[in-house]
Amino acid sequence: MEPLPPYRILPPDEDRVFMQLQPDMADTLVASWHKDVLNDLAPHPYETAALLKLALLQAEARTFDNFAVALCLMPLEFITADEAAEAVDRLIARGFVERVDDTYVSVNALALDIIESAVLPAQFRMEWNAAKASWPGPTPPTAQLTLM
C-alpha cells in the first residue's frame, strides 16, 4: 500500500460540477461534485468510483441512466473488496469521507452531495436545459442501469 494522501480542506465557495442521474427526467437527482475533489481524484479512478458509489448509497439513489455516472463507477468492477476498502481508507485520509463507526462511513457533503435538481438555481437549470435541448444526444440512447 502506498502512503496515504494528505488531508484536504475544501473551500466552501468553490465551483461545483453537476451530473444528473437521469438526464431525461425533470425531477432527477444530481451529483454535485466539488471541483477540487474532481481535480484531486482525476488520477485515481478507484477512489472516484468509491466516492460516487458511497454518495449514491447514502442518498439511496440506486437507479441512473447517465453514461458519465456509469463510467465513473466502472473501475469498481475491476477491483477486489479489499482494494475497494483501501480506496475508502484513502478517501477518509483525504477528508472526503468520514468514518462513523467500524461498518459505516459518511460522505462529506462538501466533497460530493446528491441533491434534488430543484435545489439548483432556476437560471442555471434553464441554461442547462437549453444546452441539453440543442445537443443531439448519444446514439443509441443508454439503457437504464441499477446500482447493486
Image (tube, rainbow, N blue to C red):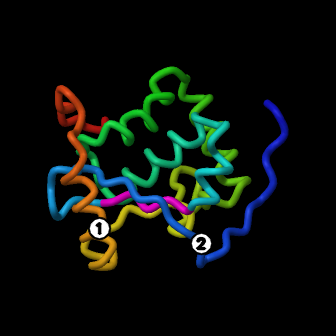
Q: Residue at x 45, y 24 (%)?
A: 77
**Where is 145 relative to 109, above or below?**
above
Residue 99's image quarter?
A: bottom right
- State left or right for residue 114 relative to residue 61: right
Q: Residue furthest front?
A: 134
Magenta span = 30-34
- State left or right for residue 98 relative to residue 60: right
Label 2: state its secondary structure. loop
Q: What residue does disc 2 label?
A: 14
- Residue 118 percent location from the top left of the image: 25, 74
- Residue 41 percent location from the top left of the image: 64, 45
- For marks 2 and 1, give the CA distance: 20 Å
- Residue 56 percent location from the top left of the image: 37, 51
The quarter of the image holding the C terminus is: top left
Q: What residue does disc 1 label?
A: 127
Q: Which sits in the foreground, 114 or 88?
A: 114
